[in-house]
């Protein structure tokens, strides 16, 4: 089970690397297996993509983005 933690990201403070993925779910599973944590759950960017944010084992925020014109 994924544990969601609260992370505030202020655009004026940071740049967030967002990586493309052909299939979000296997990427999510690899991140979690490597010790990552969910910072913001997967969400639809309507008509465009699926996107979510994670923390790596050192507390750095990064995103995962899967293009999908059917995302709702």
Image (cartoon, grey):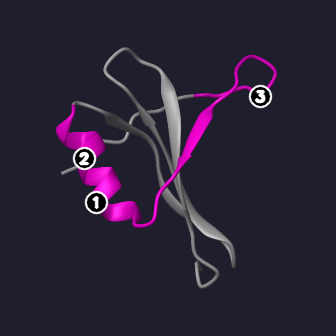
- Label 3 environment density (alpha carbons within 10 Å; few <14, some 14–19, many ≥20): few
Query: In which quadrant of the rendered view does residue 33 lie?
Result: top left
Q: Which of 50 and 6 is in front in this view?
A: 50
Find residue 16 and report its horizontal and vertical position in percent: 63, 31
The residue located at (37%, 26%) in the rendering is 56
The residue located at (41%, 18%) in the rendering is 59
Q: Name the residue under label 1.
A: 26
Q: Element under label 1?
A: helix
Q: Are marks 2 and 1 in contact (CB under 8 Å)?
A: yes
Q: Name the residue under label 2.
A: 30
Q: Element under label 3?
A: loop
Disc 3/disc 2 C-alpha distance (Å)? 27 Å
Q: Quadrant of the C terminus?
A: bottom right
Q: Name the residue under label 3.
A: 11
The residue located at (36%, 14%) in the rendering is 58
In the picture provided, is 38 more to the left or to the right than 2? right
Name above or below for residue 63 compared with residue 70.
Answer: above
Find residue 42 and report its horizontal and vertical position in percent: 47, 58
Q: Give the range drawn in magenta.
A: 8-34
Camera sees residue 44: no
């Amino acid at each position: 089970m994924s544990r969601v933690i609260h992370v505030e990201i202020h655009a004026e403070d940071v740049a967030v690397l967002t990586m493309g993925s052909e299939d979000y779910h296997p990427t999510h599973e690899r991140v979690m297996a490597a010790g990552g944590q969910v910072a913001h759950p997967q969400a639809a960017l309507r008509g465009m993509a699926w996107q979510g944010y994670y923390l790596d084992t050192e507390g750095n925020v990064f995103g995962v983005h899967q293009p999908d014109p059917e995302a709702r």
